[in-house]
Image (cartoon, coloured by chain):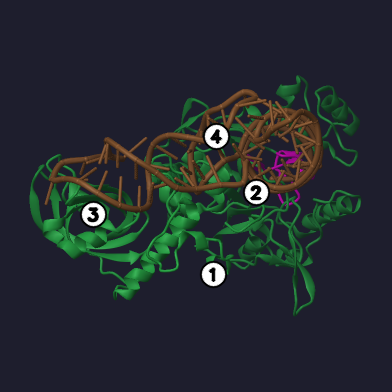
Chain colours: A green, B brown
Amino acid sequence: MDEVSTPDDGANPQTVSDDGASISGSGLAAERARRMERVDDLRSSGVEPYPYRFDRSDELATIRERHSSIEPGTETDDRVAVAGRVMLARDSGKLIFLTIRDRSDEIQLFVSKAVIGDDGFESVKALDLGDWVGVSGVIMATRKGELSVKVDSCVLLSKAIRPLPDKWHGLSDTDTRFRQRYADLIVNEDARRHFEIRHAIISSFRRTLADEGFIEVETPVLHVEAGGAHARPFVTHHNTLDMQLYLRIALELHLKRLIVGGMERVFEIGRIFRNEGISTRHNPEFTMMELYQAFADWNDVMDITERLITKAAQDAIGTTVLQIRGTSIDLADPWPRVRMIDAASDAVGSEVHPSMPREVLEGIARSNGVSVAPHWAPGKIIEEIFEAHCESSIVRPTFVTGHPVDISPLARVHRDDPYLTERFELFVDSRELANGYSELNDPREQRARFEEEQAAKEAGDAERGTVDEDYLRALEYGMPPTGGLGIGMDRVAMLIAGVDSIREVVLFPTLRPEGGDQ
RNA sequence: CCGCCUCUAGCUCAAUGGCAGAGCAGUGGACUCUUAAUCCAUUGGUUCUGGGUUCGAAUCCCAGGGGGCGGACCA
């Protein structure tokens, strides 16, 4: 960006005099001009402000671990070379204390003019907050006991041209935090922690799944038809094929093709895209983990859901106990299972069931403040009652089970009730985290369900699906009984990190583009 | 798409109709055990943008823009 910036962005003529000797003023432009001049000065004195590499002996956390019992006022013979960003500086005449930080930790640099020499001391003095440095020296502890590197050489690894945000308050403007995530990560400990937790969760999932014999696969993002969920897709275009394509809204249909192919246990952790609203719980692109297990049913899948998430919490934050809305909840406790029709019935005070006449259900819905669209089938009305009256009161992890057939076109009919499916959704803290079912594998029934979807779509329900002929062809080869699961990884990360907005666990959330040059 | 809130120095925030300020960062100076170092001095503003009301607008009004929250939409 800076390369194409306007002349007054940074190098304001008022801030650099013709002889280059003095810089007046302050503000961002003057600050950048001053630092850029420092880069030029270094180059003209033969020092490269952006060198190619640095040999580091240790990460900072390793050093802190190695010297956890160092006595105040002692010097060791442990010689190290470390690198990091200058976060704080305390200059007291012929001593300078710098705090640098790398990925693992922070450490204090003890820079004595007597040790590093006059020239070295001047170059350390000329460092700015934000610069990257590599130093070598021995490990010591100050009189107050602060673990430090007694620096005898210091090289600039990268000059920062732009000043850091406030060293104490950090960045709090959410707009800036999300647009300039790099700055957020530099100055906000919480931001770094949230993404460490997210990584730990995903890595824990991969380990658990590998241990249970699942194979990780990758399936297409570009779809000819966006199937596997009810959602509006993003539309794109392929030039050579000259055809409209959709970004995937689910992983489901390709993964089940692999079960047909005999892979037995597969999973994918991948980005999916839904062209819908943005909120604290929704980002247009988000990460879904889906798995499919041959010979399993929905009960097996609920069990693995509990294992995955409980283990992830343990791995990411060291405990399975979460604070949700002020309540301690232990994920290791069994998760309650409640039928959707029972929850909805309790909420409205009278039995609801998808076998009931549509008009009766519509009446119950309306008298409970739930408006009903003309094209909704009975099961859809029940789901709406559930969402309006039950969803928000769920705090602890709860499996809501037995969704009506008409809202579950890919799930298998319940073995004891032809109006319901063997499907569940996991809710925690009012948010849907997961969805799974015994997979429908009868190709003729699947065709009939697809045709109902298509008919509903043609009748004006834009989110409904279409008939996926290739998927039906796959099913005709025979898919073993299969349990399937989808987990919203972003929402699991929110839960375990204890944050209320999905933007706290998505590095670069979708935002409107910025207007002017920053 | 609708409602409410918000936008002031690089960052964090004051100023509520009457001279646009502080802390941090920056600059100059002092200091060989500081750690949000301290002390002295000091630079820095399109108060988001455009209109309007007023003797006078950061402040009030209108329109627009960004963001947040809630709703709508939406597994």
Give the residue pinned by disc 1. Answer: A3
Q: Position of residue A449 (x, y in %)?
A: 81, 52
Precedes in sequence: disc 2 or disc 4: 4
Q: Please, is residue A32 above or below residue A392 in the view?
A: below
Which chain is mark 2 on? A
| Kind of element beneath mark 3 | helix
Residue B74 vs residue A485, the one in the foreground? B74
Precedes in sequence: disc 3 or disc 1: 1
Q: Is residue B69 left or right of residue A2?
A: right
Q: Position of residue A280 (x, y in %)?
A: 62, 41
Could you tell me which quadrant the N terminus of chain A lies in?
A: bottom right
Is mark 3 in CB contact (under 8 Å) with mark 4? no
Same chain for marks 3 and 4?
yes
As drawn, the label of residue A397 is: 4
Say what amino acid the circle numbered 1 marks: Glu
Precedes in sequence: disc 1 or disc 4: 1
Other-residue count near label 4 (Cα within 10 Å), few / some / many at <14 / 14–19 / ≥20: many
Residue B27 vs residue A470, the one in the foreground? B27
Say what amino acid the circle numbered 2 marks: Ser
* CA separation in Å, label 2 and label 3: 48 Å
Same chain for marks 1 and 2?
yes
Q: Please, is residue A225 above or below residue A351 in the view?
A: below
Q: Which residues are magenta?
A: A403-425
Say what amino acid the circle numbered 4 marks: Pro
At a point 78% along the width and 21% down the height, the residue shown is A350
* CA separation in Å, label 3 and label 4: 38 Å
Precedes in sequence: disc 1 or disc 2: 1
Q: Is residue A1 visible?
A: yes
Give the residue pinned by disc 3. Answer: A62
Is mark 2 in CB contact (under 8 Å) with mark 3? no
Camera-near label (3 vs 4) is 3
